[in-house]
Amino acid sequence: MAKKPTILLVDDDPDIREFVTFNLAKEGYNVVTAKDGAEGVEAVKKHRPDLVLLDVMMPGMDGIEACEAIRSNPEIASTLIAFLSARGEDYSQVAGFDAGADDYITKPIRPKVLVSRVKALLRRNVKESEPVGNIERGDLLINLEKYQVFRDGSVVDMPRKEFELLHLLASKPGKVFSRDSIMDRVWGSEVVVGGRTIDVHIRKIREKIGDDRIKTIKGVGYKFEE
């Protein structure tokens, strides 16, 4: 029997920790908890969870800072992270994705919805029959095995979703990918994220590889140009 994934919940509210732990453990997941951002970062290093559910507003190191700390550590940078927050405003979600989050789940959330979102996230995280090798596009080298991007030989730090989005576009230079297609192939049709999610990730990628590589096709989507 396959081992169930480990999920790390980082939240300063004991009631939320109890609620989420109960509902995920009931589904067979291994649940580890932490009560603040700093403790959460250490827990990621120790337990190497398959998914981190991270609250935004916490004393000390908040969720945004914790997410940035995880993304800046090469050993744990590819960890799947979803914010679980009562703050549903656009600016809060943009801040979360800017920090490197893979998804943003708004509280309160019903148990069945929570479990469904977790399953969808973990399912999208499994790489089924993904080719192993490199994609070379000009001064860029995308290593599919190590989940790394190199520009002129130097490593470019990219969270998982930025990497997957760049890989998708660069896999077929010149092809225009619609926003719906990108959302489905990178985030999954069962994962509901804010409408500005793709824009935030494209902006972050452009900052790292240059503005001229990814073109915006107004009203349609994006394409990669060599």
Image (spheres, helix red, strand yellow):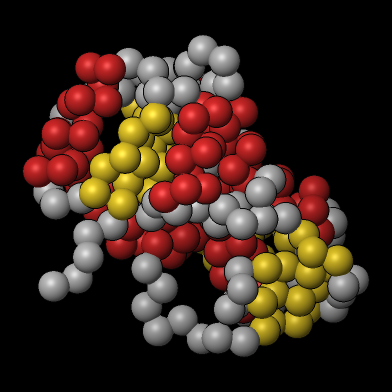
Instruction: Report the front residue among 198 and 135.
Output: 135
State whether residue 170 is above or below residue 50.
below
Q: Which residue, as the protein is rendered here, is positioned at the far left?
A: 26
Locate residue 157, reporting x and y percent.
72, 55
Residue displayed at 61% across by 62% down: 163
Locate residue 19, reporting x and y percent.
18, 26
Residue displayed at 46% across by 81% down: 130
Q: Which residue, as the protein is rendered here, is positioned at the far front?
A: 46
Q: Which quadrant would the N terminus be assigned to in this image?
A: bottom left
State whether residue 47 is above or below residue 3.
above
Instruction: Report the front residue among 165 and 215.
Output: 165
Residue displayed at 49% across by 30% down: 39
Locate residue 150, reporting x and y percent.
79, 69
Q: Which quadrant would the C terminus be assigned to in this image?
A: bottom right
State whether residue 114 is above or below residue 134.
above
Q: Is residue 41 left or right of residue 127?
A: right
Q: Quadrant of residue 174?
A: bottom right
Q: Is residue 206 left or right of residue 44?
A: right
State whether residue 213 is above or below residue 102.
below
Instruction: Report the front residue among 6 and 115.
Output: 6
Residue 195 visible in the snapshot? no
